[in-house]
Image (cartoon, helix red, strand yellow):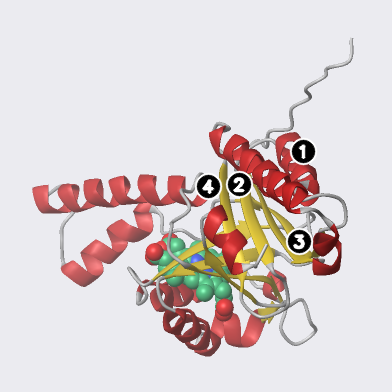
Amino acid sequence: MADKNPRLIPEQGWHCLHLFYRIDFAQWQLLSRDEQRKAKTALTEIAQEVRATENTQLLTLSIVTPKADIGFMLITPDLHTANSFEKRLTLSLGPGILEPVYSYLSLTEESEYVTTADQYAETLEREQQLKPGTPEFDSAMDTFAERMKHYTRERVYPTLPDWPVVCFYCMSKRRGEQRNWYALPFEERRKLMAGHAKVGREFAGKVKQLITGSTGLDDAEWGVTLFARDTFQIKAIVYQMRFDRVSAEFADFGEFFIGLQLPLDELFRRLQL
Ligand code: 76R
């Protein structure tokens, strides 16, 4: 018998959808007050259902500039669930009201370039002159293991922050004749990525990043979602990164979106719905 609820859960990671829409105000005006109220309730109820789903998160965004009006960021393990919520969200305010203007599909992922225990042990010996086997060395290694366990989990199974400013763009690494990231040996890529991480760590507490992989899933290779409490920090990190070799020599970017996290009732008021 056919499975009525097929499941499509990845071997690793959760699915991530970024959905951006423009509101067709001409269509919206045609609805009666009562229909408009029902439409908003319908969207609110879907959002509640999405958020009540296991391991599922939904951010609601007011997009700054007319590139889009409303944005959703959805993270959920099962692609069938993601696909079903996406279709329902698109129609939630009634047919033709939410017009999709941009979307992005990606998967949360582990990085190939995280610092390994061996590399960290080597750094401890070299930079802090700690000797393997001593209590100081062992305790530093334990702290490292604990931090990395948390870090790796957060990357693959993240908790999205409630920070108000959300920046999204997609990014690929060059495969040109002069600069081809994928033709570099692993050790060189690892070193370059260590430089990237160093710039990134300067923004600890100011910018949170979620890098989701989209090779084979969407047009670029990663979705970059940055969270901040201040647009200045978004501008600063993206600017600083441009000087780092990984971005300066190898990165190509898509369109940038800035959204503000708002609860739905405020979002409706902001959008004058
Ligand atoms: O410490 C570690 O081991 C993790 C280091 C790390 C990795 C592996 C890291 C740190 N990033 C990694 C991977 Mn990142 N990141 C971006 C952008 O606009 C631009 O120029 C680039 C967009 C920003 C702003 C950013 C921020 N990062 C990646 C990857 C995957 C590359 C691959 O696999 O080839 C991409 C595409 C990417 C892009 N990065 C950090 C940050 C910040 C703020 C950090 C520090 C995080 C922290 O230590 O908390």
* Cα distance in 3D space between marks 4 and 1: 22 Å
Up-down: is 234 above or below 114? below
Can the viewer see residue 111 in this picture?
Answer: no
User: Where residue 222 sits: x, y (%)?
Assistant: 66, 64
Q: Amino acid at mark 3?
A: Ser
Task: Answer with the quarter of the image where residue 254 lies.
Answer: bottom right
User: Where residue 121 sits: x, y (%)?
Assistant: 29, 57
The residue identified by callout 4 is 156
The residue identified by callout 3 is 103
Q: Depth check: 167 or 262 in front?
A: 262
* Cα distance in 3D space between marks 2 and 3: 13 Å
Select label 2 or label 4 by which is in front: 2
Select label 1 or label 2 by which is in front: 1
Q: Earlier in the sequence, mark 3 or mark 1?
A: 1
The residue identified by callout 2 is 75
User: Where residue 240 sits: x, y (%)?
Assistant: 47, 87
Q: Residue at x 58, y 64 (%)?
A: 269
Q: Earlier in the sequence, mark 3 or mark 4?
A: 3
Quadrant in the picture for the N terminus: top right
